Image: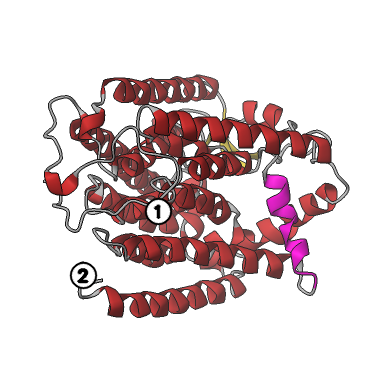
Amino acid sequence: MMNRPRLTRPAVPALAAAWLLSRALMLWLLAHSSLSLLGGGAVSREVWGLYGRWYEVLSHGTFPAHDPLWQYPPGAGPVLLSPALLPGLTYLQAFVVLTLLADAAITLALTRAGTRPGRTLRGAALWTGGLPLLLHIPFARYDVQATAFAVIALLTLQRSTRACGALAALGALVKVWPALVLVGTRKGRPSRSAWAWGGGVGAAALVLLTASFDHPFAFLPQQGGRGVQIESLGGTVLGLATHAGWPGEVRYQYGAMEFTGPYVSTVAHVSLALTALAFAALLLWRFRSAAGRWTEATPYDAALTAVLLFTITSRVISPQYMIWLLGLAAVCLTSRQTTQRPVAALIVLATAVSTVVFPALYHQVETSTWAGCALMVLRNGLLVAAATLAFRRLWRSTGPCAPRPSSLEKPLPASEPDLGSRRLPERAASPS
């Protein structure tokens, strides 16, 4: 207890109060989402209209195979059916309550991690204060639930690689990207354990879902048919191209506003190629990284870097993607040894700009006005800067020429057992 910072005890009640106040504000915004600056009801309509319609289909034991808007892996089914656990509420009300509980679970996990010796509450503070920057959007999407799987998986890694792998696999069945949290597991036995348990639990859950629902892979054709969303990096290029005479148009398809017209397929293929290049860069980092230079924060930093790289190269960058990045940045900030503090700051800035983009000034982006293009250049520029900086700092911190962690920052040995507790260092020096 004496090793904890003096401000830890009063900081926890302050965080709790901030969480309660900020979430109350977010709920108020959701209740008044019909206001034009809050999207004119479009944000909440996604839940009671789209999710509610899918709920009716899923409740009959089948995925919405013929709905082009259905683009989610089979694990999304139980999440969208979960409001049935609260029978006295409407679908929207029950969904929001469950999302709020997932948010609370993330906050609690970050707070518990931050109050351990050698840790910090900055992660819990970032999540508590960062999520409201998205206004009411987080409570009307199921990305908070997916983020909960990823955050808790990372925070359990040091105690149980098995639990980490299992949670990451379950999260991947909900929204794919949580699988990336395993990219930074320590080489050797920890990686083999996490990946094996992830593969086993994921396969078992997939078999169960396949036996419980018809058409579990109906999402694949819709995913393959997606174009270039207007908020993506490629969409920003096409939006600017309209001012140079490009004749493309914006159309609602596959659940998003996407560009149609000449060269759109080329931009989409370039995005896919960049995604493959990002994957290759992560493999190269893992191959050349020196395990002796890894710290407790390296898996966190690698997870954030991986999701950032795949976000900026995606054909779609929806506002709710910022929820993922905020959650992973918060995990990084629970450790004093993280290299990603400036990256977390860029993510917070990008989140704030995302709220101006949607819902406040989305019409400007849809019509590719100069103001809309400027907003997208700013938001996506911040994300590109964050991804570049994250990879650079991760690369330098684990390379063969990187300084070894001091005795106060000793990394966990590669042969660390899967289960059991380990006392963390009493103090840890911050990286330069």
What residue lies at 45% left-to-right and 66% top-to-bottom? 108
- The quadrant in which the N terminus is found is bottom left
Between 103 and 229, the one nearer to me in the picture = 103
Between 77 and 220, the one nearer to me in the picture = 77
What residue span does the magenta drawing correspond to? 76-87
Confirm or deny contact between disc 2 and disc 1 (CB under 8 A).
no
What residue lies at 63% left-to-right and 64% top-to-bottom? 98
Between 158 and 249, the one nearer to me in the picture = 158
Question: Closer to the camera: disc 2 or disc 1?
Answer: 2
Main secondary structure along the magenta-highlighted residues: helix
Q: Position of residue 384 (x, y in %)?
A: 32, 38
Q: Amino acid at mark 2?
A: Pro
Q: Amino acid at mark 1?
A: Leu
Q: Which residue is mark 2?
A: 5
Q: Position of residue 182 (x, y in %)?
A: 44, 36
Image side of residue 360 versus residue 295, left or right: right
The image's mark for residue 326 is 1
The crowding category of the residue bearing disc 1, from other C-alpha atoms within 10 Å (few below 14, some 14 to 19, many at least 20), is many
Q: Position of residue 218 (x, y in %)?
A: 75, 32
The crowding category of the residue bearing disc 2, from other C-alpha atoms within 10 Å (few below 14, some 14 to 19, many at least 20), is some
Q: Position of residue 426 (x, y in %)?
A: 19, 58
Disc 2 secondary structure class: loop
What residue lies at 56% left-to-right and 49% top-to-bottom? 146
Residue 398 in which image quadrant: top left
In the rendered image, the vertical position of residue 210 relative to residue 134, given as above or below: above
What residue lies at 29% left-to-right and 51% top-to-bottom? 344
Residue 132 in which image quadrant: bottom left
